Image (spheres, rainbow, N blue to C red):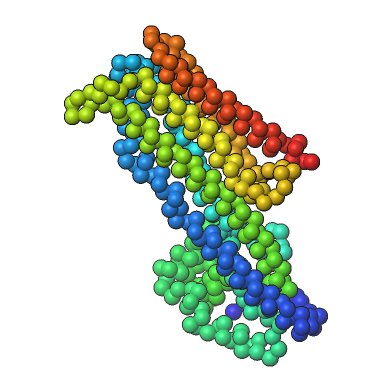
Amino acid sequence: MNHAIDLQSADSGAVSERDLQEYRAYLQRAETRLSTLHRVAGAFISGAGLLTLLPLLLSGTFSGLLALILFYPSPGMPAPASIQRWLTLVPVLASITMPLAALYLLIRDLILFYFTARTFKREGKGLIYPRFVLSGIMVSESSLDGSLEMLRRARDDEYVQDLLVPSPAKLRRRMMKDAQSIGDLTSLTLNDNEAYVADSLQQYVLRQTASHIRTLPEEAAKMEASIARHLRFLRGLVLRYAKAFLLTIATTVVTIAASGVLTLLRPVDDVRLEAVNPQYVWLSTLIIYGGWGLVAVVIVRRPVFWLYADTSNTKTKRTPQSLLNFERATLAIGVISSLAIVIDAVMYVASSENISPVAAIMTLVLLAILIATIGYAVQAFATERTDGRRR
């Protein structure tokens, strides 16, 4: 077996026994910290809270809502497939799209949290093995005194090799193809010496899992960087999940509410509900989705405000840069959705022959929602502007 794999030259005599004990103690504490971080991140893998959106999309709720909004004929409502109906589709689709986009970004962040393409080596060039972010760990050979040869013989034992390299030719061929697909072991074939093939594949597995032989100082330095990386990604992961979960709740509530309101126009047991005013139903639906625009721009910023809740009011509430683009997109879409709703309401009221005082008040409520949405979004954009971040 070739034990020269990434063996760093280190003068073990330069490290005192007391320092080695401190390194070992630190690595033990760090492993516990990493385990805790991965348990926290593991809570996001199931995405149980976000899955509340999927039944909404897969069931008849959303498709039925679209049919009611676009094509359901009713006196006092905008004509089916009219411009007012299509304008309402803007916030409806936005309310579904934003949680799905947040879910996509959450899954992306989970991949970045758990995997990396970095080599964990000093060399700047070479093959890249995308791998689980926690690297393999091997015994620090420079810290051993008299048992190094025993360790090497134990590594060469057949049962150890079988754990890394499968014996069946079919599985070895699959592993070889995996290595050759990234440019490693390109000259190796199964027709080569069996021991040579097994040893080459074993070295590939060790490289692929970043199981490099390191000194304790090198392992401690890698551990420091690994913990910092995990903490940085976990911060964004938790905030991403919070935003996605809040948007999912808002979308679920709004979709159920709008569907329930519009269903009032349908006959019950072939009897139309005469007491239901289609004008109020349509304006109520617009208010529901206008409210979604306002709620979306508020809740996408709310996790950042929670972070600063225990600090002084003089602190400028900043969103982490990795989450800023999604936040800005949500703010913009919230404003566009509210604006589309107000335009829809104005066109509807202008085309109606009789507008009751209640309908006029409902239209003013929509205008107030639009003003509040724009004001909140402008304030958020101003807080996060680039020049403000540089100060």
The extreme left residue here reads: 269
Observer-nearest of 170 and 165: 165
Residue 237 screen position, x and y as percent: 57, 52
Query: Which residue occupies 68% across, 78% down?
Result: 25
Tally of numbered tags? 0
Query: Which residue occupies 41% across, 22% down?
Result: 283
* Residue 196, image quadrant: bottom right
Query: Which residue occupies 54% across, 61% down?
Result: 40
Residue 107 vs residue 128: left or right? left
Observer-nearest of 161 and 134: 134
Residue 109 screen position, x and y as percent: 56, 51
Residue 53 screen position, x and y as percent: 41, 44
* Residue 280, image quadrant: top left
The extreme front residue here reads: 357
Res 350 visible: yes
Observer-nearest of 43 and 116: 43
Residue 52 screen position, x and y as percent: 40, 47
Which quadrant holds the N terminus?
A: bottom right
Res 322 visible: no
Residue 16 vs residue 27: left or right? right
Which quadrant holds the C terminus?
A: top right
Relative to 253, residue 235 above or below: below
Relative to 146, residue 329 above or below: above
The extreme bottom residue here reads: 146
Residue 316 vs residue 251: left or right? right
Relative to 130, residue 11 above or below: below
Query: Which residue occupies 22% across, 29% down?
Result: 268
